[in-house]
Amino acid sequence: MYDHDTDTPQWGQDEWVWAGVSGWLIICNGRITVDTPTVKHVAYWSSVTVDRSRVQEYTGAKISFTRIPYERHNGETGGALALIPHFYKR
């Protein structure tokens, strides 16, 4: 099974930021865990300023996430964040 979780701030055709993280899930006895070696991070942006050195990609024991801090041309700042927790319980 495949999981994909994203947060997508978007303002128009030419100005947008997109962060994504995905991974394979293991489901057993009502519990879902993320197979850590399969986690992939994706980040795209257009017509905003992004300092690539501040884009965070993290795969840890509890979550995997991608975070993109950005600045719009009008000076507003923000961040796109996508994450998948590594453990769910029904």
Image (spheres, helix red, strand yellow):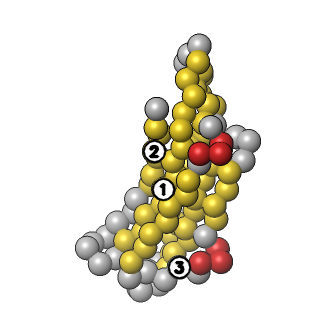
Asked whether disc 3 touches disc 2, contact meaning CB atoms under 8 Å apart, the reply is: no
From the viewer's perspective, tell me whether residue 77 is left or right of residue 87: left
Is disc 3 placed on a helix, strand or loop? loop
Report which residue position mark 1 lands on: 20
Report which residue position mark 3 lands on: 50
Asked whether disc 1 touches disc 2, contact meaning CB atoms under 8 Å apart, the reply is: yes
Is 43 situated above or below 64?
A: below
Is disc 1 placed on a helix, strand or loop? strand
- Residue at the (55%, 67%) spot, across then down: 68
Q: Nearer the viewer, residue 7 or 42?
A: 42
Mark 3–mark 2 distance (CA, rounded to whole Å)? 23 Å
Amino acid type of the residue that numbered disc 1 sits on in the rendered structure: Gly
Mark 1–mark 2 distance (CA, rounded to whole Å)? 7 Å
Question: Is the residue marked by circle 3 packed among few (<14), some (14-19), or many (20+) residues within 10 Å?
Answer: some
Is 48 situated above or below 80?
A: below
Mark 2 or mark 3, which is nearer the start of the sequence?
2
Residue 82 makes an appearance in the image: no
Displayed quadrant of residue 37: top right
Amino acid type of the residue that numbered disc 3 sits on in the rendered structure: Val
Amino acid type of the residue that numbered disc 2 sits on in the rendered structure: His
- Residue at the (46%, 32%) spot, across then down: 1
Mark 2 or mark 1, which is nearer the start of the sequence?
2
Question: Is the residue marked by circle 2 packed among few (<14), some (14-19), or many (20+) residues within 10 Å?
Answer: few
User: At which x and y percent is residue 81?
Assistant: 53, 58
Is disc 2 placed on a helix, strand or loop? strand
Report which residue position mark 2 lands on: 4
User: At which x and y percent is residue 3?
Assistant: 47, 39
Q: Nearer the viewer, residue 1 or 89?
A: 1
User: At which x and y percent is residue 86?
Assistant: 63, 37
Query: In the displayed image of the protein, which residue is found farthest to the top?
Result: 29
How many numbered markers are drawn?
3
Query: In the displayed image of the protein, which residue is found farthest to the left?
Result: 13
